[in-house]
Amino acid sequence: MDVSVENPGGLARRLKVQIPAERVSEAVDAKVKRVGQHAKIPGFRPGKVPLKVLYQRYGAQARQEAAGELIQSVYPEAIEQAELKPAGQPQIELGEVNEEGPLEFTASFDVYPEIELTGLDGLAVEKPVVEVTDADIDKTIERIREQNKAYEAVERESQDGDQVVVDYVGRIDGEAFEGGTGNDIEVNIGEQQFLPDLERALVGRKADEQFDVDVSFPEDYGAKDLAGKTATFDVTVKAVKEAKLPEIDDEFLKQMGVEEGGIDALKEKVRESLDQEAKHAVDTSVKTQVMDGVHAANPIEVPESMVAQEIDRMRKEALQRMPQEMQGDEEQAKKLLPDEVLRENAERRVALGLLIAEIISEKEIELDQDRVSKKMDDIAAGYGDQAEQVKAYYQQNPQLMQGLQAMVMEEQVVDTLLEGATVTEKETELDELLNAQRQNG
């Protein structure tokens, strides 16, 4: 078998393979003979048809089928002979299939990069040290109250923090446009969830008031037919409502899952939750710094095919987080998240995946099954009475278990690298730590 390799550039490879005519002939003969065992041809008994007759009737089809089977069996041999490590599935180009002679095909694929790890010892890591304070607990309880606020109608002018209920009709050059009409729309002033010009115009208004306001759509507005244009909105204020926070009474405590113990029990529950959140944020910060250090110390070229797969995976993850009505619209997702937006992060993910695999091999890290079990217990515990069902669901789902094992292995890699890292501790406010985590991801 003749094998040659072309390097079009980067990690791309073209593997040209020529299968000897004798091997092709043997495969075609075997295929034709198998067909002949059951072939029904007038004048011949089944299984007694001469090979020449079988070739006349089935030869072309047998050669095509044999070619496909030969490529599947020969491809791994050719890869081994060429000493290549393909990343992903190849694209196969089949040469001309002749009645006689060798069979030629070309396989195009990316190969894994050669990795020589450096800079793993002495990674600089700044570990946040966080203490949950009474002030943190009080702020969290206030945040919970804010999330559970209700709005009550008031007879005064609207102000920041109020909710204004409006009807509106938007027009451009006197013509109403699609999406520019709304009825009983609740606008929370100050939350910046509405068109800025329109939201500002709602301050200082009373119920039953009508007014017009010009609204400029930004150049990068999502609806291209409105981007950069100015619309006039006719607005009717139907109600002005004031936010009312719930009292911390028995009903509120019960909603928070506190049956007894009063406010002190609520504070203790909040403290436990914040302690867990802080620990997770610290672990995430440390892990991110370790991975950043590994990535910076080991710049590698990544297979384009793997990057393309990762971009597709990231887009699907984002699609699942979109509103229900958009979740099946992959074309819309591609418009909102084109390849170039996702590429940098996808390349980083792929690079880190390859580097982590190399670290696992070099450091001979073995998966800690006890740690996997504990991780699964921790996840299941968050589902309360359904914990056992969640664990059973994981155990019956190989894909979920693989994800869990990969998560644990990544943690083991981080722990291994931390043994040789330079770790300094930095006292950090809880809000600062959590805000940094939200910004990073």
Image (spheres, rainbow, N blue to C red):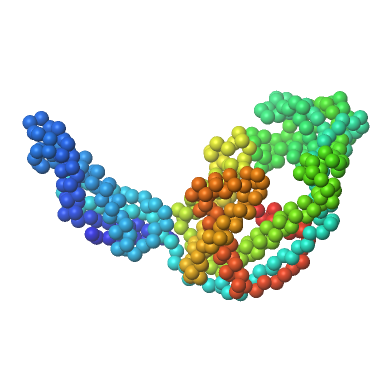
The percent position of residue 278, horizontal first and vertical second, equals 72, 58
- Where is 60 relative to 129, above or below? above
Query: What is the quadrant of the N terminus in the image?
Result: bottom left
Is 293 left or right of 41, judged from the image as shown? right
Q: How many marks?
A: 0
The percent position of residue 400, horizontal first and vertical second, equals 53, 49
Identify the residue at horizontal 73%, vertical 32% (top origin): 231
Is 432 left or right of 71, judged from the image as shown? right
| Closer to us: 399 or 196 | 399
Mark yes or no: residue 203 visible: no
The percent position of residue 397, horizontal first and vertical second, equals 50, 47
Is 222 left or right of 101, judged from the image as shown? right
Mark yes or no: residue 134 visible: yes
Which picture quadrant has residue 36? top left
| Closer to us: 30 or 333 | 30
| Closer to us: 319 or 262 | 262
Identify the residue at horizontal 51%, vertical 62% (top origin): 367
The percent position of residue 166, horizontal first and vertical second, equals 79, 29
Identify the residue at horizontal 68%, vertical 58% (top origin): 280
| Closer to us: 45 or 123 | 45
- Where is 390 relative to 126, above or below? above
Which picture quadrant has residue 344? bottom right
Is 12 left or right of 63, judged from the image as shown? right
Q: Residue furthest right?
A: 156
Identify the residue at horizontal 91%, vertical 30% (top origin): 155
